[in-house]
Image (tube, helix red, strand yellow):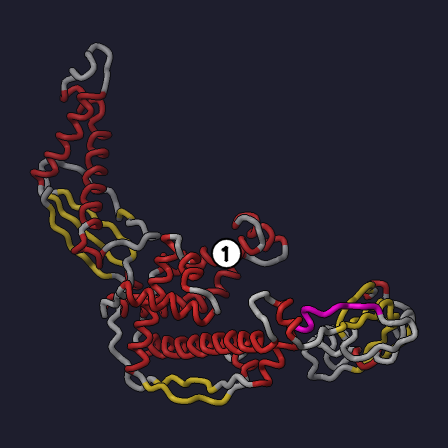
Amino acid sequence: MKFTKELTKLEKSAVKLTVTVAKADVESSYKSTLNKYVKQVQIPGFRKGHVPANVLERKFGDQIKMEAAGDMIDGILNEIFQDEKEADIRPLPYAQPALDEMPAFDTSKDFKFSVTYDVFPKVEVKEFGGITVKEPQVTIGDKEIQEELKAIQERNAVVMDKKDDEKCEKDNIATIDIAELDENGKVIDSTKRSGFVFTVGSGEDVYKIDDEIIGMKKDETKEITKKYAKTESDKELAGKTKKYTVTLKQLKIRNLPALDDDLAQDVNEKFKTLEDLKNDISRSLNTAKDRKINEIKTNSLLEQLVEKNPVEIPASMLKAELEGRWQMMAQQFQTTPEDLEKMITASGQKKETMLTEWTGDAEKMLKSRIIVDSLLRERNISVTPEEVEEGYKKLAESNGLTVEEVKKHYEDPRSKEYFIDDVKEQKLYKDLFAQVKVSKGDKVAFSDLFKAN
């Protein structure tokens, strides 16, 4: 079928595709549809397949023309969008072409129709000038390893009751009954709370009365007056003075295991000595550090690229991203998107309001994604089997695994595809960092590194 096409660019990466079909092909398409009716339609007084065409046209003329027009439009669009040479004008997967209006079908004239849809944004990333990426300076030392060892000790600790005559101390696990008192010293029923458990001095106590219960014994009751600073993070408490009655119901202590080879072996049978465990902790911490620093550098680079190379996000792309986040939230709540909306509405919120609040972050992420995808195509970034193999090796080394274990994790075709895509992206970022200025950033403690972004 012969046709001509014209593409008009609209706002936000939308396009209008106008197609004109020569009248000879219009007539041919109509006859093809008419012949199909001749073979299939059965009308009283005529044998099936022997109904005269003029009879069918009188009875089903408009329907035949509509079907012929629809088949012609579908066929032409499929031909255009499946053509590899037309990849740049294919609609996004979630942006089905919308017919502006169904044109009149006349076999004596050319047939012209237009569809509007979103395409992948085209952006030429050319501006790299002035981009500086700062790399945080982080050192993993004995302090960080000791902190992790302490956490391992606590996870493997044995919790035991303290003796009734022993006093509450810092790091004890306390269980209390608490209630607020009014100005006359009477309990406010709505504030009663039984069995509140927290570790003294850990910051888990929302009432901030850790210091006041130190020295108390089991079953002891005490009235506490607490004056909260105006800078208190809990706005319900900031600048106020509260009176509480507190009863210490239980008091427990953690018996920490010794830092020795036995503890290392309890953590994992692959460790024979405490030194093996320390070496593995060092490896894990350095892997986490490197990943976080790389994430910070990459985010900084992408933010600056987006700022210097404006990107228009198609409306359908943004809508799909927001709906995807909504579905993910539903999965987290172990419910359906529809029931999640009912839950949100019942709590006094609206789905539309939440999606609006998410929009800024979603746009930022999509612009970065578009920049990366555009650069991957523009630079024709690809990876060899050897580079993929090297990727497996690096991942295995950083996670204390064998290459075979890593490969098994990615043996599913879809998972392997994701892994290869990540290797491509890392190759791209390596090229990009070579084009911009990477300077040393501030010294940051390991624990603070994960608060930076």
- The quadrant where residue 117 appears: bottom left
Q: Return the x and y of residue 424 as percentages of the image width and height.
A: 31, 67
Residue 447, above or below 14:
below
Q: Residue at (79%, 66%) from the top-left corner?
A: 196
Residue 334, above or below 189:
above
Q: Which residues are magenta?
A: 153-161
* SS label for mark 1: helix
Q: Residue at (31%, 86%) from the top-left corner?
A: 130
Q: Which residue is mark 1?
A: 328
Q: Quadrant of the N terminus?
A: top left
Q: Is residue 87 visible?
A: yes
Left/right of residue 401 with respect to residue 173 in the rendered view: left
Q: Is residue 159 magenta?
A: yes
Q: Residue at (27%, 67%) from the top-left corner?
A: 376
Residue pushed farthest front? 272
Q: Amino acid at mark 1?
A: Met
Query: Would you call the spot at circle 1 few (<14 residues within 10 Å), some (14-19), or many (20 or more)?
Result: some
Residue 432, above or below 112:
below
Which residue is at the front of the view, 151 or 353?
151
Which residue is at the front of the view, 245 or 218?
218
Question: For the image shown, how many numbered marks are present on the structure?
Answer: 1
Q: Residue at (26%, 74%) from the top-left corner?
A: 125
Which residue is at the front of the view, 429 or 156?
156
Q: Return the x and y of residue 129 as percentages of the image width and height.
A: 28, 84
Which residue is at the front of the view, 178 or 420?
420
Residue 372, above or below 107:
below
Q: Is residue 397 magenta?
A: no
- The quadrant where residue 297 appears: bottom left
Residue pushed farthest top? 45
